[in-house]
Each structure stands twice: as C-alpha cells, then as structure tokens.
Image (cartoon, helix red, strand yellow):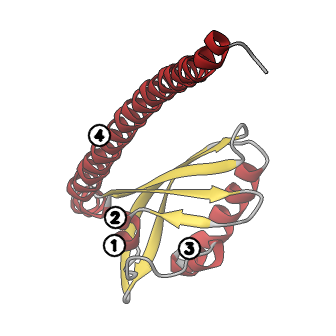
Amino acid sequence: AAPRGVRELVPVAIFVAIGVVVTVFHTRVRATNVRLADAITEREREIAERKRLEDELAELSSELMRAQRGAEVGSWRFDTSSHALVWSNETYRLFGMPQGAPVSYDTFLSRVHPDDREELDRRWNEALHGASFDIEHRIVINGETRWVHSKVELHVDVGRLIGTVHDITARRRLEHEL
C-alpha cells in the first residue's frame, strides 16, 4: 500500500489534472469560437457586399432599360455555340413581340422586310465568321414597315454576336419628305 501522504495527494493530483484539461479545453473552445465568430462576420460582410452589388446591378439594369426605351435602341446577343438568341425588352418592343417570347434567328428574319432578307442574311453569316456589320434595313411589324439601324460584332472570346437595333423610322420618313 502507498504511504498515507501519497494517498492523500492522489485526489489532489487528479483534481489538478482535471483542472488543466478543462482549462486547455476551454482555451481551445474559446479560440475556436473566436475563429467561428470571425468567419461568420466575414461571411456577413461578403453577403452584405453581394447584396449591395445585386442591388446596384438591378438599378443599372433598370436605368439601361429606361435609356434604351427613350432612345429606341434595343440590344441582343446570340450564342454561336448554342444558337440561343436573347433580346432586351426594347428589342422585343421594336419587333412587336411580347416580352419574353421565345426568339431565334428565324424569328428575327421573319420580321425583316422581304426585300432586305437576303442581304441581311448574307451579312449575318459573314458576322458569324468574324465580320462586323452596320446596316439600315426595314422590318415589318403588324403590317407597318419600319426602318432600323442594326450593328453587329462577333466577340470571339465569349463566342457571341452582340448587336444593337435602333428605330430610325422617323428619320427616314423625314429624309423622304425632304
């Protein structure tokens, strides 16, 4: 058997060892909590920044739509891989189509005046191979012939044709009257 003094020290030693373990555990937990709090704070900053950027993007998009409407200039993009065509709200309006309706190159071409289709189709195919174009042509919307000015560029780095269409009917009518 262990001497009496040693037997009395065993519980004290166990108590001290438990205290050290608890202290080390609490220190690690506190450090982990601080790291977690820092990570949460950083994530909250990232979320707030993302929300700010989304709000700014929505505001800029709204401003662009108002500017396009006021200037009667629409924009569009055509993905050369998927052949997906995306029109701005103003492009839909200029072509007399409901916003969000499915569009394709054939949809666009069907709105082009029959006498201008061949030339426009030729220019479109050249643009798919890298040529830009800048052309005035007619479109027919609900039986009315309108004039538009179309510009197109191929952006090879993103595989897209990007274009604008500007309603120039008033200018062409004025020129005709003079």
Pointers 2 and 1 in contact (C-beta within 8 Å) = yes
Measuring 66% from the left and 50% from the top, which residue is drawn there? 160
Name the residue that disc number 4 marks. 52
Name the residue that disc number 2 marks. 90
Front residue (pair 56, 74) = 56
Instruction: Quote the CA–CA distance across marks 3 and 2.
Output: 14 Å
Instruction: Quote the CA–CA distance across marks 3 and 4.
Output: 36 Å
Name the residue that disc number 3 marks. 108
Q: Label 4 amino acid? A: Arg
Q: Nearer the viewer, mark 3 or mark 2?
A: 2
Measuring 34% from the left and 64% from the top, which residue is drawn there? 90
Circle 1 SS class: helix
28 on left or right of 161: left
Q: Label 2 amino acid? A: Glu
Q: First in sequence: mark 3 or mark 2?
A: 2
Q: First in sequence: mark 4 or mark 2?
A: 4
In percent of width and height, residue 95 lies at 41, 74
Instruction: Quote the CA–CA distance across marks 4 and 2.
Output: 26 Å
Q: Label 3 amino acid? A: Phe
Name the residue that disc number 1 marks. 93
